[in-house]
């Protein structure tokens, strides 16, 4: 603006000089003096900036020096041709301009002015930075704009606003203030508009040193850098699918034996003041930071452990402990709490505790009397939980169908649940016999805590998290199922011969299945089937002998089966004959009841006569053979048989005669 005014005045003076040379000379000299006053501070400030930017290199003078020298030369030449009175007036104008420039302090936008009082009394409580108008650096600052201040009393230094990038936070250290009491590492917070009100900070009792509050990223702050030092640090980032653990560097001391301090709601540890005022204690905290977010956490107050820095820290805590706990769909998660009430001598799993939302709120679990150790409540398959590994350990127990096999294990099967189950070997009559056993079981989710509690694990660290150790289930399989099967075969081997041992295959499987089912019922585990493989001897000769014996037994069984089938067929034939006999008898009795015995006899004779064969040609002279074939002759024979019949009781009463038993059978055969 000053340069613009000068240029306009110079043009006006040059025009006047052309019209009225004598007065224009004075006007032009006055304008030149104003230009010198306007350009000198700018050239000086530019030279200072160049020196600051090029500390190690020799800097060239700014371009503004050339017009300034030229302007001074012209002005001196013009003044030399003026009278003494005019020279005095110009000198007075020069002094007035210089005084104006010195007393008028301009603070550009985006900057503040830090004021230092050169003279005056010193405040006893604030010798360096003062909230009052006393000697020293003033706590208040000058906002952007023009400010009139005496150059003999005040010195103004212009500094830019404090910029905090989006991915950073500003840690503030007070250079002046009260001395901290006790052994506190951080200064107590006071209201001071994010440290932009320096006077309010000092008057409200602000303390020296690192402050609890921080400056959020993505903003600018008008902070007095003579009172506060701002250090930029990265925001805390917790990657997606992980958690962040928090250790408090400041706060109260935990009671002896306490693993955690009391939980304090403090906006995910971003409000350090609430944490300290609410009774927060040093050490490990129960709450965790959820993944996939950034947090404005003061690293001087809280130490945050994430996957970014856990490896560099060393110790038992690893990156796997900071991952969210994901339970596969075919398994259940048995929870073991590392803190809580003493379970005492109770041999049961910890009872259900309300309100802790699947162990996501461990402080609620502790407040409601949760016990330390294995818990009755489990994490269902398919769930994902962000749990504190300092507080819980989760062991996976399969709930799907398990096939356990007693056989020789390959190196690839050393992690199986049946790794300790070898092939069953029984010594019978001095012969070693082998048999492969297979047992199917299923562990319900409600039975998993008891199984883990009674079989334990190999985890000795105080760090929890998701534990992939299969030892509890392997111990259960070995101690329970392995012991039952081995003991059973040892007992029957001592009381059986080789043939009996092999022959009683079906009985062995049934007895073993019953034993396993009874034992698993006490554990709450469901048996799904017991299977035996083929018995095989170590001695191949015995295998051949057993094979021949088996072949003979199979042949004998085949013959016995054929005999049984033949006997069944005979019985079936007898039944059929008897059925046919009853049918014929019933038909004959029915005819007698309807027609009478005599009529039936006549009908029978007529049927017999009609069916008699008659020769079509007779040779020779013997007529006896021909007469025997005539119907009348057969009729005489039938009449003779009928005369020999005895008369019996009627079918329905004495009035009706009945056929004799013999005739009935003969009629049945004919029918």
Image (cartoon, rainbow, N blue to C red):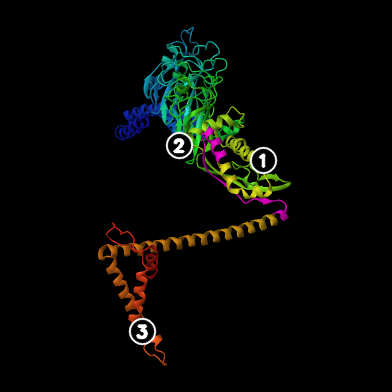
Q: Earlier in the sequence, mark 2 or mark 1?
A: 2
Name the outermost residue toward the bottom. Answer: 620
Residue 609 spot, x, y in % from top left: 33, 78
Q: Which badge, 2 or 3, is on the more N-terminal residue? A: 2
Circles 2 and 1 in contact, beta carbons < 8 Å: no
Where's the N terminus, which quadrant?
A: top left
Where, by quadrant of the figure, is residue 95 drawn?
top left
- Counting from the top left corner in percent of width and height, residue 266 is at 44, 22
Check disc 3: other Cα within 10 Å, few if <14, some if 14-19, many if 20+.
Answer: few
Q: Which residue is mark 1?
A: 490
Read off the residue under disc 3. 614
Circle 2 sits on which residue?
383
> In the rendered image of this protein, does residue 421 appear above or below residue 160?
below
Asked whether residue 151 is in view, the answer is: no
Nearer mark to the viewer, of 2 and 1 = 1
What SS does tag 1 mark?
helix
């Amino acid at each position: 603006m000053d340069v613009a005014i000068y240029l306009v005045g110079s043009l006006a003076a040059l025009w006047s000089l052309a019209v009225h040379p004598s007065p224009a000379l004075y006007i032009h000299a006055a304008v030149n003096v104003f230009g010198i006053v306007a350009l000198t501070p700018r050239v000086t400030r530019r030279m200072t900036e160049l020196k600051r930017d090029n500390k190690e290199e020799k800097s060239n003078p700014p371009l503004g020096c050339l017009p300034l020298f030229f302007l001074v030369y012209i002005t001196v030449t013009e003044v030399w041709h003026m009278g003494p009175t005019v020279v005095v007036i110009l000198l007075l104008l020069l002094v007035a301009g210089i005084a104006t420039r010195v007393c008028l302090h301009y603070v550009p936008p985006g900057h503040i002015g830090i004021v230092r009082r050169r003279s005056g009394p010193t405040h006893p409580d604030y010798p360096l930075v003062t909230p009052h108008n006393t000697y020293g650096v003033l706590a208040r600052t000058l906002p952007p704009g023009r400010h009139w201040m005496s150059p003999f009393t005040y010195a103004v230094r212009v500094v830019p606003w404090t910029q905090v990038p989006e991915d950073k936070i500003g840690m503030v250290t007070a250079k002046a203030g009260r001395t901290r009491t006790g052994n506190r590492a951080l200064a107590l917070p006071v209201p001071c508009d994010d440290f932009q009100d320096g006077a309010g900070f000092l008057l409200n009792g602000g303390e020296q040193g690192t402050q609890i509050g921080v400056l959020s990223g993505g903003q600018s702050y008008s902070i007095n850098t003579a009172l506060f030092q701002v250090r930029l640090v990265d925001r805390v980032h917790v990657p997606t699918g992980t958690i962040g653990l928090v250790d408090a560097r400041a706060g109260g001391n935990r009671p002896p034996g306490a693993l955690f301090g009391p939980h304090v709601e403090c906006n995910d540890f971003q409000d350090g003041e609430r944490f300290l005022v609410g009774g927060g204690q040093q050490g490990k905290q129960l709450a965790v930071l959820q993944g996939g977010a950034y947090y404005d956490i003061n690293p001087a107050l809280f130490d945050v452990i994430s996957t970014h820095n856990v490896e560099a820290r060393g110790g038992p805590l690893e990156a796997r402990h900071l991952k969210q706990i994901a339970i596969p769909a075919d398994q259940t998660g048995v929870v073991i709490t590392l803190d809580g009430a003493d379970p005492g001598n109770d041999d049961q799993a910890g009872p259900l505790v309300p309100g802790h939302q699947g162990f996501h709120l461990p402080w609620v679990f502790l407040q409601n009397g949760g016990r330390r150790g294995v818990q009755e409540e489990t994490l269902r398959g398919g769930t994902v939980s962000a749990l504190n590994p300092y507080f819980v350990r989760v062991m996976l127990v399969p709930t799907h169908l398990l096939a356990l096999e007693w056989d020789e294990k390959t190196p690839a099967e050393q992690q199986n649940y049946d790794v300790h189950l070898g092939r069953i070997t029984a010594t019978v009559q001095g012969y070693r016999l082998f048999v492969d056993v297979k047992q199917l079981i299923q562990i319900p989710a409600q039975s998993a805590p008891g199984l883990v509690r009674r079989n334990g694990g190999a985890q000795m660290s105080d760090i929890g998290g998701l534990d992939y150790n299969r030892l509890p289930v392997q111990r259960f399989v070995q101690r329970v199922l392995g012991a039952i099967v081995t003991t059973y075969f040892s007992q029957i081997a001592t009381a059986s011969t080789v043939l009996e041992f092999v022959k009683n295959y079906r009985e062995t499987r049934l007895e073993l299945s019953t034993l396993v089912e009874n034992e698993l019922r006490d554990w709450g585990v469901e048996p799904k089937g017991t299977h035996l493989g083929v018995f095989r001897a170590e001695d191949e000769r015995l295998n051949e002998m057993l094979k021949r014996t088996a072949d003979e037994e199979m042949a004998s069984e085949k013959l016995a089966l054929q005999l049984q089938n033949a006997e069944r067929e005979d019985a079936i034939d007898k039944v059929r004959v008897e059925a046919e006999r009853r049918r014929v008898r019933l038909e004959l009795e029915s005819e007698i009841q309807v027609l009478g015995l005599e009529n039936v006899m006549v009908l029978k004779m007529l049927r017999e006569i009609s069916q008699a064969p008659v020769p079509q040609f007779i040779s020779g002279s013997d007529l006896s053979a021909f007469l025997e074939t005539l119907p009348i002759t057969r009729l005489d024979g039938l009449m003779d048989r009928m005369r020999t019949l005895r008369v019996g009781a009627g079918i329905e009463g004495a009035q009706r005669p009945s056929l004799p038993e013999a005739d009935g059978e003969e009629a049945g055969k004919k029918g």
